Amino acid sequence: MNTVDRNTWQDRAVDHARLLSQVTWRPVADGIPMRGKGEFKADTAYTGVTYSNGGWDGRMIGFDGGLRTFLAAVENPLSVLYTADLRGQRANSAAFYGTVCSGFTSYALHLAMQIGSSWHGPHHRDGIEPAQPQSAQGARAGDVLWCRGHVEIVTQVTTTPDGTATQLRVEDSWPPTTRTKDYTAAEFDSYLAQRKAVLYRITDHDAWRGENRAERFLFPNYTMDAQAATINRVLLLDLGDWVVYRKGHPVIVNIMDRDHRGVQALVIQREGRPVEQIPLDGPGTVERTPARSGDYTAHCIMKDGTTSQVCEFAVCTIDSRPATDRIVLGQPWEIEFYAENMNAIHVLIAEEADPNYADPVAPHSIWLNDDHRRQGRVTVPAAALSRAGKSSVTVTAENRYGRLRNRHVIDVVSPA
């Protein structure tokens, strides 16, 4: 391990990276899509979470929900992991749940929201600079390894008593799951040269994160992600368990009764109060679309009169729209938003264009406060956009079970 002292955030960054990179799981059926071609195979052990940005419909593990939600979905052969193929929605879309390189490093480095690989470095963030020297001898755990379109994190450096680095471990998200790569010092230097990569050192963690700090919000929830989850063996939801549904979308309960105890009824409750009790003849699916927002549970009454473990889910709403009829470049404008059973926390304004790695344009973030939430609106500053044309507005809200986003595309016109 490192012989140099490491700040507490660096120790935590390594631990958090390994929550996603070292988790093991085993599909119960074929069909979970891999990025590119192929699929994960039933009854095959995999290490590390799936590689996918979730497209427009899916969720990012760690940010949009906990690791346990993904693991629960793995155990339900009728879950969205098996039934939804998001390849083609976005460049790095595949499975409904997953992460990508920048999601992996953002999670490890204690960010509240993922930032793209291009936004990790000193051109866009304070408190970071190139490590010196640009070689294995300049590397420390917690350093960011960046190359065009990709980002990784150094999680271990082994040194001799005189401080010479001899072995390095680098971890990243890469299809189909994650990678844990061990290098000798010479191999690491060759890799840097081959990828034309830059090794960055975060010198001021709080300055680097700015307002984008995980501890200010409900997710990522590292304590929960580090705990072993007991997955329900009687019933699971189409989104897994411990998860958020958008109001108006159906909730599909798969009664599996994997231990053949015999099921008698499905009980759905909202905020601890009964909503419905549905007689059951055996395993099968039950679909309901809750009309009211709130936190719900579902459990089975077994043939012997006992009750099963509950599944937990929330039904929530997040809506938003531009409150300014005509959005003019160089002028401020407003966004209205409305949330039920969750708090709106963030607005992202991004110009719609293909990635320009040579001169990327950073999206504009607005972190919402209690005043914004009371008013249900926020002003977007004139400087948020640099050109006319199409841009996207994404409003994110969170509940204790996860996050939802509302995204729409706007037309920005040039001033008359």
Image (tube, rainbow, N blue to C red):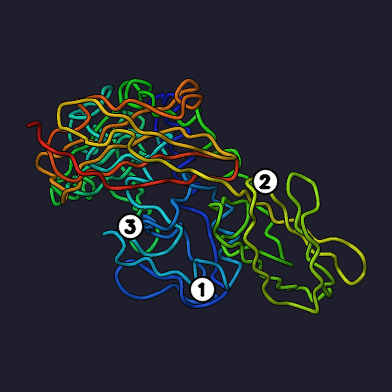
**Residue at 57% over, 50% down:** 244
Numbered mark located on residue 44 in the image = 1
Q: Nearer the viewer, residue 322 or 131?
A: 322
Tag 3 residue: 174
Above or below, comparing residue 341 to residue 42 in the picture: above
Q: Amino acid at mark 2?
A: Asp
Percent coordinates x, y for residue 265 in the rendering? 82, 68
Q: Nearer the viewer, residue 386 or 232?
A: 386
Numbered mark located on residue 295 in the image = 2
Q: CA distance from mark 3 to mark 2?
A: 35 Å
Determine whether, in the image, residue 27 is placed left or right of residue 151: right
Above or below, comparing residue 26 to residue 269 in the picture: below
- Crowding at dot 3, Cα within 10 Å, few <14 / some 14-19 / many 20+, comes out as many
Quarter of the figure with the C terminus = top left
Q: Amino acid at mark 3?
A: Trp
- Give the image quarter of residue 231: bottom right
Question: Could you tell which of marks 3 and 2 lies nearer the N-terminus?
Answer: 3
Percent coordinates x, y for residue 208 in the rendering? 32, 25
Q: Are marks 3 and 2 in contact (CB under 8 Å)?
A: no
Q: Amino acid at mark 1?
A: Thr
Q: CA distance from mark 2 to mark 1?
A: 34 Å
Determine whether, in the image, residue 47 is placed left or right of residue 262: left
Numbered mark located on residue 109 in the image = none
Where disc 3 sits, the SS reads: strand
**Residue at 43% over, 24% down:** 7
Please state the total of marks drawn on the protein image: 3
Quarter of the figure with the N terminus = top left
Determine whether, in the image, residue 152 is placed left or right of residue 113: left
**Residue at 53% over, 60% down:** 24
Where disc 1 sits, the SS reads: loop
Judge depth for marks 3 and 2 and give the one in front: 2
Question: Could you tell which of marks 3 and 1 lies nearer the N-terminus?
Answer: 1
